[in-house]
Every structure is written in structure tokens, then in C-alpha cells.
Image: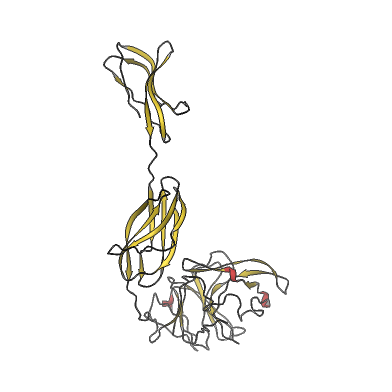
């Protein structure tokens, strides 16, 4: 809204009265809401127009009126300057909130802006109590930021125990640096002690966090002895064929996928290229033993499909399923307890006790979680096994205690 003041040497009534705007090429950008049949007298009159916006630039502005005869008259002009709208950059989230000392973590910044622009650099900054620069490495160059949220992920680094100031930052194309609002970043001390074992006398012997590329020293993702031909096994109409490219690691999660393959199996069926990793045939030569306690975190799609999970496999023996998720039943899992091994099935989060599943073939303890369904398998083909479907507790990291 604009409010110019006009007056005349004698009172008269104009047919129309308003405020005009012209850009550099003479285009009419007048303010809306001019007055009609308005009397103007020597004491003056303030004109109130409607509101409108303008692009950044310089304009000619003037008052105008129309006589009752229909003639238009423009009043003297003045310069009207519209400055560019200020850029407002908002940090929606900066992570992580905390970390463990000397354990590498990555930074993550989610941000948006009042209008699109390309930042020369976007990253996550960290300062200690003395103000030392401990920024996350891997800031992103030439990052476009618009009104929709965009997330930037940095490289990894570790920190000593302590409290830090953490914030997002960016550099504009002119070279100026801008820090976004800070938050507290707490790094707790690391402990060399073994995590509390759910079974007395056990300690952590093996762990995988998937916090980097899959290590060839720890995992083999190309072959398995469970497959007659190394990477596929057409027996019993099995369709999966191991494809190393179907296992990827993102943000601490190993992602396994299965897609239709162009490969034709000996039985004439088309295979499915499938992700699988195993500790077989690698330099570390890690193997589980009877009585080991395994803990893992698995998420599967809700759609119907093949079973996914974690298994152990010994040469010359049928594989034992530590945990498998039935198709179409997200949030549930099936466990196989082989009689000959005396394996223990534990729920560390809900109960820190264990009941050995042995030759008496006792049901799975209720404290493992809400029992959904039990299916007893006959001796034919499943000698000494019981399969139990249970509701999964909150997920835990992949680890093994002995």
C-alpha cells in the first residue's frame, strides 16, 4: 500500500486518482486501488492504494488523476527503488546429537532457503570449548539450496570425549561464510569393557556395524557352500543367484535386494539376482560355535516374497536359521532351535535371562516376546527341530558373544 499526498489551489473533483509505476521499458505497473470521484482541495489529501509487489530494480513513480472530461494528467515523477529480497537460510536439522569417543561418525545437515541459490560450500562445523575448528570433513561444493529441504552428508571423523558446539554452515559465491544456529554435541567416553552379556561369562568376540564399505577380510559376497554351483543352486526349484552388486551399504545399514535376472538356470527357470554375504572363504575365517549368542537387526519389506534373515552353516550339515522373517509378516521372525546344538535363543532387551532349548523340546519362553504362533514340524525332513514365529523386540546391532 502506498500513501502519496496531493493538493490543489482550488477544490475540484477528479474522476480517478492513483499512483503510477513504470519500469525501465515503460511497462505499466500501477498500484491497484485508485480512488474515483475524489475531491481535491488546498488542504491536501492522502491517497491510499492497494498493495502489490515488485521485482528488484529501479522504477519511475508518480501520482496521476483523470479529469471529469476524461483527460489523464501525470504528476511529477520520482525514483522508486526495490532492493532484492534478503536470502534466509534455515537449518532444519543437524546431526548427530551425540557420539562415542574415538568412534568415527558422519555429519548430516538438512536445510532450506527462502529462495533458490547455489552455495559454494555446505558443511557441518564443530567447535570445542577453546574454539578449535573440528569440522566434519567432506563438505559439499556447489550445492543448490531451494525452498524444499535438502540434506547434505559429510565424511566421517572421531572426537575425544567432551561437549562441543555443532552447526551447519555455508559459503556464498562471493566468498562470504555464514554459520547457522548451533546445538550441543555430546561425545561420551568409550569403554574398553565388554558390553553386558545376556549370558553370564560371555564376552563380545565379533561385531559388524556396516559403517563403511563391506570388508573383503570379513565378508564374502560372491559365493556360498549353500549353493551347489557356488552362486546358484537349482535344487528344489531354488531361483536365487548370488550377485555381489545386490548388497550395498548406506548410513550404517546393509541393504540386500533381489531383482529378476537374465540368467537361465539348468532347470529352465529364470534366476533372481540376490544379495548375500557370508563369512565363508575369507581370510578372517570366522565361525560360530555351539552356545554362541548372536544379536542382529533386520528390516524386511511388507510385501510377500522369499524369506530373509541370518543363518549359520557348517560344512556337511544342514544350515540352522538364527533368524528368518516370513514373507508378508513384517515385525515377526521365525527361529529354528536345533536339538543337537543346545542353541540358546535370547531376548536381551526385554529380559536378561535365558532358557536353554535342549532335548526336552520345551516351548520358547514367553519372555522372548509375545508368542504369535508355533508350528511343530514332524520328524520327517526336520528331525529334532521346532520352528517358532515370534514378534520381534526392538532391534539390536549385529554382534556375537561367546
Against 167, is 173 above or below? above
Question: Which of 291/46 is in front?
Answer: 46
Name the colour scheme: secondary structure
Regarding residue 34, the answer to whether it shows in the image is no
Q: Which residue is drawn at 64% across and 69% down?
A: 272
Which residue occupies the extreme front position in the image?
A: 175
> How far from the left and from the top, in percent, is residue 88?
38, 46
Asked which quadrant contains residue 114, the reply is top left
Question: Which of 135/324 is in front?
Answer: 135
- Badge count: 0
> How far from the left and from the top, in percent, is residue 231?
64, 76
Against 187, is 399 above or below? below
Does residue 9 appear to the left or right of 59 in the view shown? left
Q: Which residue is drawn at 61% across and 77% down?
A: 223
Question: Which of 361/161 is in front?
Answer: 161
Regarding residue 90, the answer to whether it shows in the image is yes
Against 138, is 218 above or below? below
For the N terminus, the quadrant is top left
Asked which quadrant contains residue 346, the reply is bottom left
> How far from the left and from the top, in percent, is residue 194?
37, 81
Does residue 237 appear to the left or right of 102 in the view shown? right
Against 366, is 37 above or below? above
For the C terminus, the quadrant is bottom left
> How far from the left and from the top, in percent, is residue 340?
53, 89
Amino acid at each position: 500500500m502506498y500513501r502519496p499526498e496531493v493538493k490543489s489551489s482550488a477544490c475540484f473533483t477528479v474522476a480517478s486518482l492513483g499512483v503510477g509505476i513504470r519500469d525501465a521499458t515503460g511497462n505499466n505497473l500501477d498500484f491497484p486501488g485508485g480512488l474515483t470521484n475524489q475531491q481535491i482541495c488546498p488542504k491536501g489529501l492522502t491517497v491510499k492504494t492497494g498493495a502489490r509487489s515488485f521485482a528488484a530494480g529501479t522504477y519511475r513513480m508518480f501520482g496521476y488523476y483523470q479529469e471529469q472530461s476524461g483527460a489523464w494528467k501525470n504528476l511529477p515523477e520520482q525514483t522508486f527503488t526495490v532492493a532484492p529480497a534478503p536470502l534466509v537460510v534455515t537449518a532444519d536439522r543437524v546431526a548427530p546429537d551425540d557420539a562415542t569417543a574415538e568412534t568415527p561418525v558422519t555429519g548430516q545437515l538438512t536445510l532450506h532457503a527462502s529462495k533458490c541459490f547455489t552455495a559454494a560450500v555446505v558443511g557441518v562445523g564443530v567447535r570445542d570449548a577453546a574454539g578449535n575448528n573440528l569440522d566434519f570433513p567432506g563438505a559439499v561444493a556447489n550445492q543448490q539450496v531451494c525452498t524444499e529441504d535438502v540434506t547434505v552428508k559429510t565424511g566421517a571423523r572421531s572426537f575425544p570425549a567432551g561437549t562441543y558446539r555443532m552447526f551447519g554452515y555455508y559459503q556464498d559465491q562471493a566468498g562470504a561464510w555464514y554459520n547457522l544456529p548451533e546445538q550441543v554435541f555430546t561425545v561420551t567416553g568409550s569403554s574398553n569393557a565388554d558390553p553386558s552379556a545376556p549370558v553370564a561369562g560371555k564376552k563380545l568376540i565379533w561385531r559388524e556395524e556396516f559403517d563403511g564399505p563391506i570388508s573383503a577380510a570379513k565378508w564374502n559376497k560372491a559365493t556360498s557352500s549353500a549353493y551347489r554351483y557356488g552362486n546358484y543352486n537349482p535344487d528344489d526349484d531354488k531361483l536365487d543367484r548370488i550377485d555381489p552388486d545386490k548388497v550395498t551399504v548406506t548410513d550404517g545399514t546393509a541393504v540386500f535386494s533381489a531383482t529378476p535376472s537374465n540368467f537361465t538356470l539348468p532347470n529352465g527357470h529364470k534366476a533372481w539376482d540376490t544379495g548375500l554375504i557370508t563369512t565363508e572363504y575369507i581370510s578372517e575365517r570366522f565361525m560360530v560355535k555351539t552356545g554362541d549368542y548372536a544379536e542382529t537387526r533386520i528390516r524386511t519389506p511388507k510385501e510377500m516374497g522369499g524369506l530373509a534373515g541370518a543363518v549359520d552353516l557348517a560344512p556337511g550339515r544342514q544350515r540352522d536359521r538364527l533368524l528368518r522373517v516370513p514373507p508378508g509378516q513384517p515385525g515377526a521372525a521365525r527361529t529354528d532351535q536345533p536339538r543337537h546344538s543346545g542353541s540358546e535363543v535370547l531376548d536381551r532387551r526385554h529380559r536378561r535371562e535365558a532358557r536353554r532349548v535342549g532335548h526336552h523340546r520345551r516351548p520358547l519362553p514367553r519372555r522372548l516376546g509375545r508368542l504369535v504362533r508355533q508350528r511343530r514340524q514332524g520328524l520327517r525332513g526336520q528331525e529334532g527341530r521346532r520352528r517358532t514365529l515370534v514378534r520381534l523386540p526392538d532391534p539390536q546391532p549385529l554382534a556375537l558373544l561367546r
